[in-house]
Image (cartoon, rainbow, N blue to C red):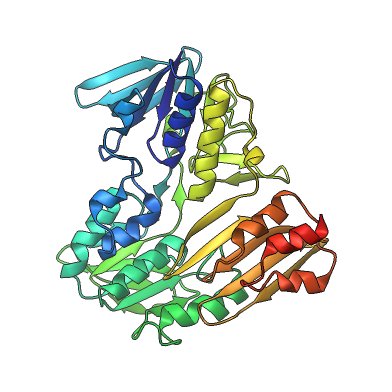
Amino acid sequence: MRHVIIGNGIAGISAAETIRENRPDDEIIVISDENAPPYLRANLSRYVIGDLPLENMRMKPPGWFETHSIRRVHGKVSAILPDEKKVVCLKEDGEDSLDFDRLCVAVGASPNMPPIPGRDLSGIHVYRSMKDAGRVKAAIPGCEKIAVVGGGLLGLEVVEIALRNEKPCALLQRGHIGKPLLDKDESADILLPRVSGEDGVHNPGARVILGRTPEAFIGENGRLKGVRLSDGMEVSCDMAVMCVGISTDPALFENSGLEFDRCLVVDERQRTSAPDIYGAGDCVAYPDKNGRLAPTRTWALSRVQGKTAGLNMSGVPRKMWDEGPLYNASHLFDMTYVIIGDHGASGEGFSRFASRPDASSYRKLVFRGDVMAGALLIGDRGGSRGLRRLIAEEIPVPSDEDKKRLLDSAFDPDALYRELT
């Protein structure tokens, strides 16, 4: 049986690795338009800053594809033909087609570039891939002032890069920074003082401008000189980095017949609307536990989806949620964080318990009734594994006193687990 996987990010590689574990004799082909080896996207900022050398960015060691008998094809897939069970691939030597028995689409997503006048000026970048990071890294030494448009997780990475390189930086964000990880109040209390330098960690910090959007890029002789905002304010800069979300390119799916709603639609087994075609990672929308379609936006979820797709492609029935509650660890500006389960749940029947032990730490637990639905830990991640166990097994925590005990990073959640079971 031939398995074809489009994309060599964490979703595609997890699918390939899982298929090989379960189908040692099947043929596996991974197609990617990136010539670089699979890399750890979560470490891009460490690479740009200089904390991590390029060779340490590899997701897998050299020779991994050969060791696992996985064939790599460098090219861009231009069409998926479900009825013919073929994909059309554009390679350096021309167009080619590949047959498949089962296909996994894991093409990821691309950074958005809004149609802002002046966006073609030299000095304007996006930040998402290894190529993007390389361009940003090369441009920073020669620039004087940086404007970062977008205050989500990627935008905050770029702000940290600018400050670590001692470059004056302005952060432009329409809403609050740190979305979707933090709500508005959490952002103002935890993140804004740190990014702006008010808490003294970064001196100077970034100039944070909220509630306004770029109206035009201003240039001179083809080079960026500034950004004009929606209220007429002008921000001086000779380098701008756009971090305003990502989207799935619909062109690949237009004539495929696959269900597409801003993303490739999959079910809980990562199956698309066509037989033997699966999807995983940033390019897909999946049904969350409430049955609503949700985009995939974290490394951990992409890995789980890739593994789930690989299992089902191997003939091993598996639902995405069989892996347990989501567990994702990464960086928020210069702080580490862990999210477990549905940390953003709110509304009727939900309650929230939170603590702020110090300026660099924050802990939030969300309960549906007495059952923990999710947790967010910033800074000190003590007890995270035990919290995940309580969430996974839906153990009721009836006492508010016990709920508050779980906010203490020194308290062992497994001790409470033993008390309650």
> Looking at the rendering, which quadrant does residue 318 occupy?
top right
Q: Which one is nearer the viewer's eye here, 297 or 301?
A: 301
Question: Is residue 6 positioned above or below 261 on the image?
Answer: above
Q: Which one is nearer the viewer's eye here, 284 or 316?
A: 316
Q: Position of residue 201 (x, y in %)?
A: 40, 83
Q: Position of residue 197 (x, y in %)?
A: 41, 84
> Looking at the rendering, which quadrant does residue 165 occupy?
bottom left
Residue closest to the far right: 398
| Left or right placement of residue 6 versus residue 67 in this view | right
Residue visible at 65% across and 41% down in the picture: 321
Q: Position of residue 13 (x, y in %)?
A: 41, 35
Residue visible at 51% across and 13% down in the picture: 83
Q: Position of residue 210 (x, y in %)?
A: 48, 76
Q: Is residue 122 visible?
A: no
Q: Which one is nearer the viewer's eye here, 153 or 122?
A: 153
Position of the C terminus by quadrant: bottom right
**Number of on-image labels:** 0
| Left or right placement of residue 397 versus residue 30 in this view | right
Residue visible at 54% across and 21% down in the picture: 314
Q: Is residue 1 visible?
A: yes
